[in-house]
Image: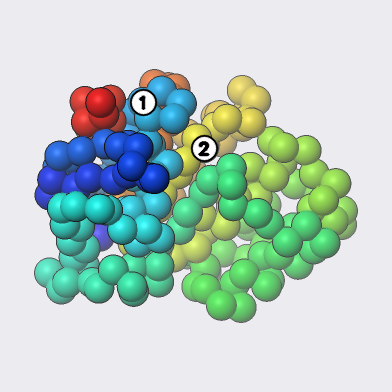
Amino acid sequence: MHIRLEAIQKSYQKKLIFQNLSAEFESGKRYGIAGHNGSGKSTLLKILAGFITPNAGSVRFTLADKSIPVESVYKHINFVAPYIDLPTDLSFYELLDFHFSMKNRQRNANNNQINEYFQLPTELPIRQFSSGMLQRVKLALAFFTESDLVLLDEPTETLDDRGFELYATLLENLSNNRTVIIASNKDKDFIQCTSILRINDFTV
């Protein structure tokens, strides 16, 4: 998916978050959005996902040279963020089955093939998972669901060193032909990124 931002501005209750932000995200490439906590990284990701709209400027989504209406963008994205909840009464495999009853699996991978990457327990309810294990579940859903755009908000925040290695492997092996945009305050999260947008350049 190709995305073009032209002079967008966002504010909440008269507090300006960023302004005059223009950027272009090309199909099939990986990008970073860097900035300190509270700088507006998550807000920008939500705009890129079509969840919220800017107060000024324009956002254009294009797929295979065809314009995508903002209200339809959600059909083409996978989104990982700390504020997105999971149905914790399900086991990992039950969640995969439920999720993929509505979405297509990347490479038609079955549950066992997916879990070769994540090494998660398959019998426990997700509510018993640690924060790092929950993050692995979110990454599993994002990278193994077919999509044109993957948005990752603080993707390694709760991951240990092995979890970070997994994250790097997922980027390398499962993000080809998809636009990937990563928001983080950790430069190491931007491995394999084509370019990095510094959101502080557009704040006041």
The image position of residue 154, as x and y in percent, is: 50, 35
Around disc 2, counting alpha carbons within 10 Å, would you say few (fewer than 14), some (14 to 19), or many (20 or more)? Answer: many
Instruction: Give SS at disc 1.
Output: loop
For the C terminus, give its image quadrant. Answer: top left
For the N terminus, give its image quadrant. Answer: bottom left
Mark 1 is on which residue type? Gly
Around disc 1, counting alpha carbons within 10 Å, would you say few (fewer than 14), some (14 to 19), or many (20 or more)? Answer: some
Image height check: is 185 above or below 183? above
The residue under the point 22% across, 45% down is 9
Image disc number at residue 143: none
The image position of residue 29, as x and y in percent, is: 25, 45
To which residue does mark 2 refer?
Answer: 155
The image position of residue 13, as x and y in percent, is: 39, 45
Mark 2 is on which residue type? Pro
The residue under the point 39% across, 52% down is 46
Q: Is residue 13 visible?
A: yes
- Locate residue 79 relative to residue 47 in the image: left or right: right
To which residue does mark 1 refer?
Answer: 35
N-term-proximal mark, 1 vs 2 = 1
- Locate residue 162 relative to residue 20 in the image: left or right: right
Instruction: Give SS at disc 2.
Output: loop
Camera-nearest residue between 184 and 53:
53
Res. 112 image quadrant: bottom right
Q: Is residue 176 visible?
A: no
- Number of residue marks: 2
Distance, label 1 to label 2, CA atoms, is 14 Å
Q: Residue furthest bottom?
A: 101
The image position of residue 162, as x and y in percent, is: 63, 27
- Locate residue 53 relative to residue 25 in the image: left or right: right
Q: Residue furthest front?
A: 14
The residue under the point 47% across, 54% down is 79
